Image: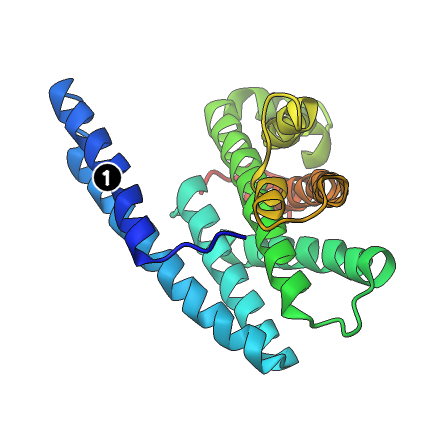
Amino acid sequence: MIELGLLQIALALVLMVAAIALVRWHHLGLELTLLNATVRTVLQLLAVGYVLAIVFAWQNPYSVIAVLLVMVAIATLVARNRIDKRLSRLLPILAGSLLTTLLLTMVYTLGVIIRPAVWYDPRYVIPLSGIVLGNAMTAATIAGDRLVTNLKRNPVEIETHLSLGASPQQAIAAYRREAIKAGLIPTINAMMVVGIVKLPGIITGQLLSGADPLTAALYQMLIMLMLAFADLVAAIMVTAGIRRLFFNDAAQLVLP
């Protein structure tokens, strides 16, 4: 593999300089946004690179678990902020949903499919967990935001169902189904065109590192199947938790 150094990254930054120039030329007003995004990308990835180099060298289960917990915590905060900051009890729901999704997906993948020499091998655990968490966070965010929005917009319809004898689950069943489907759209769309229209990051990275193309394709296939499962579990769990936030013990609709 051709290794990249600071000189190559400096040359790559020329692309962002050109992008900012184009933004300014077209008066889009995104100069500071692009600059901030570029700086954050460089600093965050440099920090991650150094941290992971240490974790990979240690080969210690506690350091791997610590990295995973930090990832779950960050994903939880990002998802909560994008759904609704005012829902105070949403944070533990998201944390539990994302952690459960990660555990279910990774235990099966590592224990049954990949089976590394040690379960905490950071070479497999951290990259795969990062992909699963990132996609599960997106699915949970989309599904959660869609459900919260619909519940706030349609209180009269929901209360009508309740007054006719429907349970809270029945009263919002259509909204919940819609939210779960929305959360799965990005992954389903990606699965439809993967390898034909788009080469995802994992297969691209493996090809650049010199891996056999068939092996890279099989790993990408595994990852897409993992993501479909993880996104569905995350969307189901988050919408179930949000449902409980909007109803009290007397099965009455309560808008936070």
201 left or right, relative to 46: right
Residue 20 visible to an observer of this rendering: yes
- Which residue is nearer to you in this view: 147 or 206? 206
**Residue 49 location, x and y as percent?**
44, 64
Residue 248 visible to an observer of this rendering: no
- Which residue is nearer to you in this view: 203 or 6? 6
Q: Residue at x 64, y 55 (%)?
A: 128
Determine the secondary structure under disc 1.
Answer: helix
31 left or right, relative to 223: left
The image shows residue 190, relative to residue 238, as above or below, that is above
The residue carrying mark 1 is 14
**Residue 2 location, x and y as percent?**
49, 52
The image shows residue 140, relative to residue 158, as above or below, that is below
Q: Residue at x 52, y 26 (%)?
A: 150
Q: Residue at x 47, y 29 (%)?
A: 149
Q: Count the marks: how many?
A: 1
**Residue 167 location, x and y as percent?**
72, 34
- Which residue is nearer to you in this view: 253 or 4? 4
Q: Residues within 10 Å of mark 1 (few under 14, many from 20)?
A: few
Residue 106: name its quadrant: bottom right
The three-letter code of the residue at mark 1 reads: Val
243 left or right, relative to 76: right
The image shows residue 22, relative to residue 75, as above or below, that is above
Which colouring convention does the figure follow?
rainbow
Q: Residue furthest right?
A: 112
Q: Residue at x 19, y 25 (%)?
A: 23
**Residue 186 location, x and y as percent?**
59, 29
- Quadrant of the snapshot with the C terminus: top left
